[in-house]
Amino acid sequence: MKNFIVHIVILGLTVAISIGFIFSKADGHADAFYLKFTKGKKSNLILGTSKAAQGLQPGILGQTVGKEFYNYAFALYASPYGKAYLENIKNKLNKLDTNQVFILTVDSWSLSSTTTDPNDSLNFRENKSYMSGITNPTQKINYSYLLNYFDESYYKILTKNSIAILRDDGWLEVTLPNDLPSRKRRTSFTISGYQDKVDSYHFSTLRYQYLLKTITSLKNYGTVYLVRLPVHPTLMAIENQLMPNFNTGIQTAIDWSDGYLDLSPDNAAFQYTDGVHLTKASGKTVSEKIGSWITEKIK
């Protein structure tokens, strides 16, 4: 019996050491979000869903504005505006810096809910995600995320995914075939998916109130700019089914911010990997455009 217990202890220690070693190797290749819940407090946040996570490049913005930006945008299911996202932002924010620049990307989806009652916060889609579950997004190794929200095999941590890489500045760099037939095929699939979604999403006044609370909270630490990112024209038509008068509907948020840039009139001028997310080249152009606009606003 004694030998059996010793073997069990040795086996347990071996497994624990192995898991600890693997966790220590988790980096931007591991998954699309893990690094954002490490790395300490951050200033000059870029906020929003995957449009911003993939589209806005902190390095390009930094070169233009003269600030070191961090992309703290996630995904449609996890980071619509609401209590969970706001609390997570507060936990990530460097509150010692009061001269920051914040970019909040806005669209119909991030202000809408899939619940029968759009204001039913107890059943908001992000409640079961890492956005609610991770209360400390600044750990060197975030065991809570890796144990509870890492959906892949841990073996993947030791391999290097070349399609999606989460950079140290929070930008999710996605590399997909950029030929026209590939983009058209992905866009057609995405349009179909979003057309199916539109009937289940409904504008939430509570989410909008949390957008206002987010603006108010961040203005204690600097200036806040709202940006509506471009999407494929057909996807914009679907968004407009959800909120036909978008700019009018968020007028109070615009008034409370330090400026609003609506890039939707230029939708057709950019390329998208799938209709929603900007290609790397177009993301660079859009980041430069936003950076130049903010620079002029600051002046």
Image (spheres, helix red, strand yellow):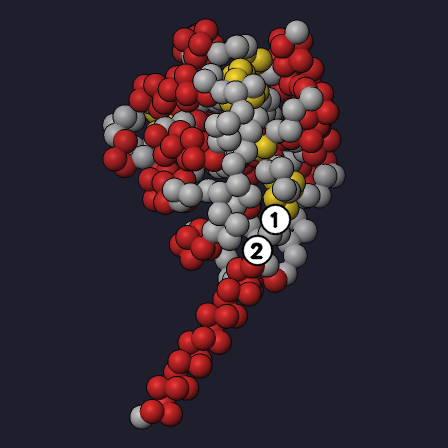
**Residue drawn at the location 59% of the way across and 32% of the way down:** 70
Q: How many neighbours does mark 1 have within 10 angstroms: few (below 14), some (14-19), or many (20 or more)?
A: many
Quarter of the figure that contains the N terminus: bottom left
Whether residue 236 is visible: no
Q: Secondary structure at mark 1?
A: loop
Seen from the viewer's position, the closer of residues 180 and 3 is 3
User: Going by the image, does 124 lie left or right of 89?
Assistant: left
Identity, as a three-letter code, of the amino acid under mark 2:
Ala
Residue 118: quadrant of the picture: top left
The residue at the point 56 percent across, 19 percent down is 99
Q: Is residue 182 left or right of residue 211?
A: right
Q: Residue at x 45, y 55 (%)?
A: 143
Check disc 2 and report the residue beneath it: 26
How far from the left and from the top, in percent, is residue 294?
63, 14
User: Compared with residue 97, is residue 16 higher up or lower down, i.e. above or below?
Assistant: below
Asked whether 232 or 220 is in front, the reply is: 220
